[in-house]
Image (tube, grey):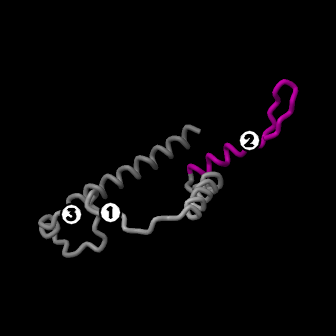
Amino acid sequence: MEMIIENLLDEVDKDYQQSSKKSILDYVLSELEERERVGIIEILDLPIEYGKSKYKGIIPDEQWKQNLQSSKKDIAENLILCNPATLSRKIIISNEVNTIHRHDDVVVEI
């Protein structure tokens, strides 16, 4: 179990490092002079500058909102992430859950 936790923490750390590097690069390259200094002629997907752009989409109706809530619930209940640490944790928990637990002479199978 310790190894699984260590793998999960390593994964979180790696994702954090990658996100930090991308954020710094996006910030530096948001200035035209810096892009020219580095030699970048064009950026296809410019990062969004918060506060300057607003959502311009349609306003969803109640049926759409209900479908969204239902879908979120289904995903939360049924989604399984397929990374090695999560799968090994799922196997361990599955093995533990499939055992029979005895409480006060009452047999409960989970």
Answer with the quarter of the image where residue 96 lies. Answer: top right
Query: Which of 37 and 63 lies nearest the eye of the viewer?
Result: 63
Residue at coordinates 44% horizontally, 47% vertically from top-left?
12
In the image, is 11 to the left or to the right of 98?
A: left
Q: CA distance from mark 3 to mark 2?
A: 51 Å
Pointer 2 or 1: first along the chain:
1
Farthest top residue? 104
* Residue bearing the label numbered 2: 97
Helix, strand or loop at disc 3? loop
Q: Which label number is shown at residue 72? A: none
The amino acid marked with disc number 2 is: Val
In the image, is 40 to the left or to the right of 74?
A: left
- Read off the magenta span: 85-110
Mark 3 or mark 1: which is in front?
Answer: 1
Q: Position of residue 87 (x, y in %)?
A: 61, 52
Mark 3 or mark 2: which is in front?
Answer: 3
Q: Is residue 27 magenta?
A: no
Q: CA distance from mark 2 to mark 1?
A: 48 Å
Q: Which label number is shown at residue 29? A: 3
The amino acid marked with disc number 3 is: Leu
Q: Quadrant of the N terminus?
A: top right
Helix, strand or loop at disc 1? loop
Evaluate if marks 3 and 1 touch, with contact meaning CB atoms under 8 Å apart. Answer: no
The amino acid marked with disc number 1 is: Lys
Residue at coordinates 17% horizontally, 67% vertically from top-left?
35
